[in-house]
Amino acid sequence: MKTQTQLTRRGLFQAVGAAALSAPLARSAPERRLKIGQTSINWGFRVESAEPGIRESAKLGYWGYESYGDVVEAVEQKIGWQKLLNQNHIPMPSSYFNFNLTDPAVRKEQVDKAVRLGNILKKCGGKTVVIGPNPVKRPAFDFNTSKADIVATLNEVSKTLDGLGLVAAVHQHTGMCIDTRDEVYAIFDAVDTRVVKFGPDCGQLQKAGTDPVKVLKDLQSLLRTVHLKDFAGERAWGGYCPLGQGKVDLPAVVEVLEQAKGMEYIMVELDMTANAPMPPFECAQTSKNYLMNLGYKFRS
């Protein structure tokens, strides 16, 4: 049963989102203000995937590149992120880091990891850490039992990142300990939203049977970044697809994002798989063309 405090907080998020949307949507579409970037997942998770991902993102005129996971340390040690970014004249505004949120025994390790990886991002001029939850066996997973530990670790990790001058944005993820719409809402009813913000994945919300637009509206005041992904439900790309080829109402999604005051970047994402019918560059080009039709501009 929801407490009065929880209901009040939920109502506040919804009211802020509704107020921000009502007036602009009644007029003509505003000029696009958000920058479009690419996530590294389109090229893969290995050290050798970083250079082509950065180079091709820059070649296509994307405004930024988001690095991924523990490979961030390996790339820093073997190549150096700043070297790659400077060579291609593209910034790295965000990084996606996985954290174990359910096991309190490793909470200190997660905080230490936040400092270690966060400092690499900060060194490169980045601002936003996308917090990826840990995987769980979903059929046997009891979210309510784990909720207190998830909240405690999120608060500690996010407070630590805030102390580094970075923003922590929780990213719901298929098969992880924060996955469904109800779990997302339950987490934001409980965490310290002064330091814990939201960085959703639109395609994964769609895949989970959730309307991404409603979730974005409800939590609009907490949005700091997003993985803009489309979902078609077919085998290629794990069921995802280049933008505009799936079921996600992308025009409605970007209208909500454009009016989220905490947003600066929209990060395009597509899970690269072995059976993908297009190479990464062509995928990124296809999504770029779609976004240009929505009024977005890319670097020349």
Image (spheres, rainbow, N blue to C red):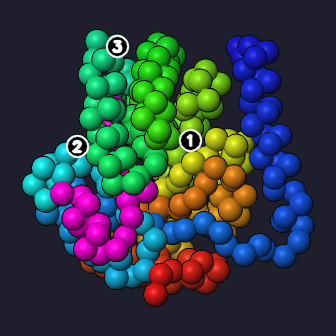
Mark 2 surroundings within 10 Å by alpha-carbon count, few (fewer than 14), some (14 through 19), many (20 or more) = some
The residue that appears at 81% across and 52% down in the rendered structure is 20
Percent position of residue 212, x then y: 62, 52
Which residue matches tag 3? 104
Q: In this view, does 155 lie above or below 199?
A: above
Q: In the picture provided, is 218 more to the left or to the right than 238?
A: right
Percent position of residue 52, x then y: 22, 72
Tag on residue 198?
1
Query: In this picture, which residue range is highlighted in magenta?
Result: 80-99
The Cα atoms of the two marked residues, 3 and 1, are separated by: 22 Å
The residue that appears at 24% across and 58% down in the rendered structure is 81
Identify the residue at the far bottom of this view: 300
Which residue matches tag 2? 70
Residue situated in front as seen by the camera: 239 or 268: 268
Identify the residue at the far left of this view: 78
The residue that appears at 14% across and 63% down in the rendered structure is 48
Q: In this view, does 100 lie above or below 130?
A: above
Q: Please, what is the three-letter code of the amino acid marked with disc 1?
A: Phe
Q: Please, what is the three-letter code of the amino acid marked with disc 3?
A: Pro
For marks 3 and 2 on the same chain, the one whose residue lies earlier in the sequence: 2
Q: In the picture provided, is 168 more to the left or to the right than 237?
A: right
For the N terminus, which image quadrant? top right
